[in-house]
Amino acid sequence: MDSPREDFDVPTSVGPRDSLDASSDAAAVLSAEGDVIGWTRGAEALLGRPAATVLGRPAARLLATRVDPARAAGVAERCRSGMGWSGRVSVLHQDGRSVVVDLRVSASFRVGGAESFLVSAREQRPEWTVGQSVLDGFLTRSPIGMAVMDLELRYVWVNDTLEQLGGVPREQRLGRRLSELLPGLQGGTMESLMRKVLATREPVTEYEYLGWSWSDPHRQRAYSTSFFPLVGPDNAVTGVCYMVSDVTERWNARQLLSMVNEAGTRIGTTLDVLRTAQELADFAVPRFADFVFVDLLEPVLSTDGHGAWLTDAGPAPARPVMRRAALKSVREGSPEAVARIGDQVDFLPPPHGVDLLVHGEPILIPELDPQDRLWITHQPARTARIREFGLHTLISVPMRARNTVLGLTTFARSINPLSFGPDDVLLAQELVARAAVCVDNARRYTREHTAAVTLQRSLLPQALTGGTALDVASTYLPADATDGVGGDWFDVIPLSGARVALVVGDVVGHGLAAAASMGRLRTAVQTLADMDMPPDELLAHLDDLVLRLGEEKSAGAAGEGGSDTFVGATCLYAVYDPVTRRCAMARAGHPPPVVVPPDGHVHFPEIPAGPPLGLGGMAFEAIEIELAEGSLFGLYTDGLIEGRDQDVEWGMARLRAALAGPRADLDTLCTTAVQQLVPVPQPDDIALLLARTHALGADHVVSWDVPVAPAAVADVRAEAVRQVAAWGYHELVTTTELIVSELVTNAIRYAEPPIRLRLLRDSRLTVEVADGSSTAPRLRHARSTDEGGRGLFLVAQLAQRWGARYTGEGKIIWAEQEITGG
């Protein structure tokens, strides 16, 4: 055929190769007729035939055996279909010898338009065989312990490594079972695994276990064992082989890692310093040590000051003042301990001083010698305990976190015969480091929580009084220390006209920020209440204040790169008037009050809930209810009716039941109600304010309608003087006469009718003049040439307090005088 003949240049010098690497195979290209049209150097090297002696000649001449025409045709058809073919054939070398090759024929392709086939060959190499002596040496000296057991699980062959691992000579093993020789190596379990292998013919691999061996009877070691069946020529199981290796280091590393991970979940579950220290001791005994004690610096256990030393704050004190914070022993009662929890201690392993706490590394004493002169001199009591209880090894680890020195943790062993080593120091260091961070977190949190509680209690009213209108009692419980103090507050504010304001609120959030925000809101409520604002209007002003606080905090957080903002508060504000026995109230997202009239029927008045403070743009609505004399009126925060395990409706039902009992002393009722509803610490603050109402009867209040005429001033002034004298307040007659004269005169001159004068006596004598005008009174200083303008100035001088409040019909100017002698 007229097709180009090419000599393919393929290197013949190759090194070790992969079985799939065909880059150095002998290759040739055949035409459709079976003639050689391409010959590589690899082919020339394989058969010793130069290209010139092969090209253009039939490839069949290169075969050592006669070609079967039918088989050749079948191979050609397979290759033309795109499948290719491979097989083993014998070819002739130039020197006449036969060479066995793996032959591969590619799918057909075209060269210059003519059909062609690529043929590649690789010489078969003789497989390596192992002599019996080599095999015996390999098995005997293998670094993995190996043994063969018969069908009765008795030793029939053991290699050197297994003999050394178990510490039992080969002669003593042969013919005996594993459980008879090494009972400390889980012989029964391993024999059951071998029986399973014999029965199922399925191998068992990597079975790990702990055990003792005669080669190292004082140290527990870890082993990994695999079992597989031995099968004879007749496919019958003749025994079982097992291989074992010592994986103690791997096992210990895994156990240490597991212990460290578990410590992360077991240590530091609370924000309590002593609890965290005790969790460290409890975790380490008996897993790691037989006796553990944790000594913390005394300031760490205190909520005052910084609570610890800083490691870069200069020289440390000459001798640390520490207290025992935690203690644990494998012996009940920890008899090894010289000091008990709470005792002052000064333990530092001699000859180390305070620098060990500040800058020192962990101390390892592998062999603790009770005859050591340093210990006898500096720690005589502890030396005696060391001797008595056999403490033989010790690790002391300074407890530091965030550049702060906290104390010292000591681990010791007595029952465990193994001495501590360098790996144990790393584990002890890791355990103490984790605990130190938790202790420092608890210390910082405890200090902040104490400060927040102190701040909040200082901002809450120290004494409550409802005057003659109300008897009051209160109970406040801060949140559980793990959740942080909240922003609950309450107050009782005396108002003019013998009225009393009751307020309760709750700032969203916890901590110092919530307590500080609560203080600002309580002050604002007192200021707005002094202005005699109605409840809905007071809440509207308070809402504006919360919005401003939120904007201020948002701007501050943005400037500091933070995101915390003042998110809001809830509040309920009520005003009780003992004259009318009416109570006006409004709420901003706060739970409704509870009312218990004298008949004992507990109910929650339906007051529009209103939005929480801080949303802005929404109105508040006030209502008025009448309270019978002797009614119980209660305000509370949501912590009283909400909890970890109850909803609001259930909490309100429980509050109803707690207040529906027999009439009790108000303080006792307040305390017992909180105890019944909240028997355990809760995640939120709890405040309960109870008030029992009184009414001012007709003998305490007198009023007159005032005609709009200047001549009427003298008449009402005379009536007022007679009434004050009838009440027996002769020392107040003159001042009352002047106050009534000035207030009534101003109303007639500047205000609008109707005008009404009212005298009210409770703990004070109050003069009130009501008119139909909403014009605010103004106190000014008259000049010496002015004929008037001195009325209110004179009233302010004569009265203890004076002011104005607005009503739906106008306003009321009032002035109070103290009643001497009660």
Image: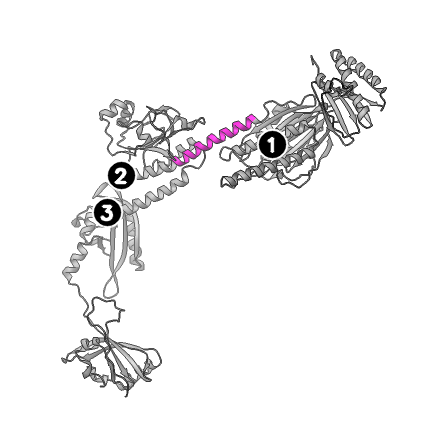
Q: Which residue is mark 3?
A: 180
Query: What is the C-alpha distance between the residues marked 1 and 2?
Result: 59 Å
First in residue order: circle 1 vs circle 2 = 2
Q: Which residue is mark 1?
A: 521
Instruction: Name the element at disc 2.
Output: helix
Render colour scheme: one colour
Extreme-bottom residue of the structure: 1
The quarter of the displayed image where residue 220 is located = top left
Instruction: Name the element at disc 3.
Output: helix
Disc marking residue 752: none
Instruction: Name the element at disc 1.
Output: helix
Residue 603 appears anywhere in the view: no
Q: Which residue is mark 2?
A: 422
Q: 53 or 341: which is nearer to us?
A: 53
Q: Is residue 399 left or right of residue 640?
A: left
* Residue drawn 49% across the image and 32% down it: 481
Q: 28 or 468: which is nearer to us?
A: 28
Residue 768 appears anywhere in the view: yes
Q: Nearer the viewer, mark 1 or mark 2?
A: 1
* Amino acid type, label 3: Glu
Q: Which residues are magenta?
A: 436-458
Extreme-top residue of the structure: 730
Instruction: Where is residue 339? Give x, y as percent.
Output: 35, 25
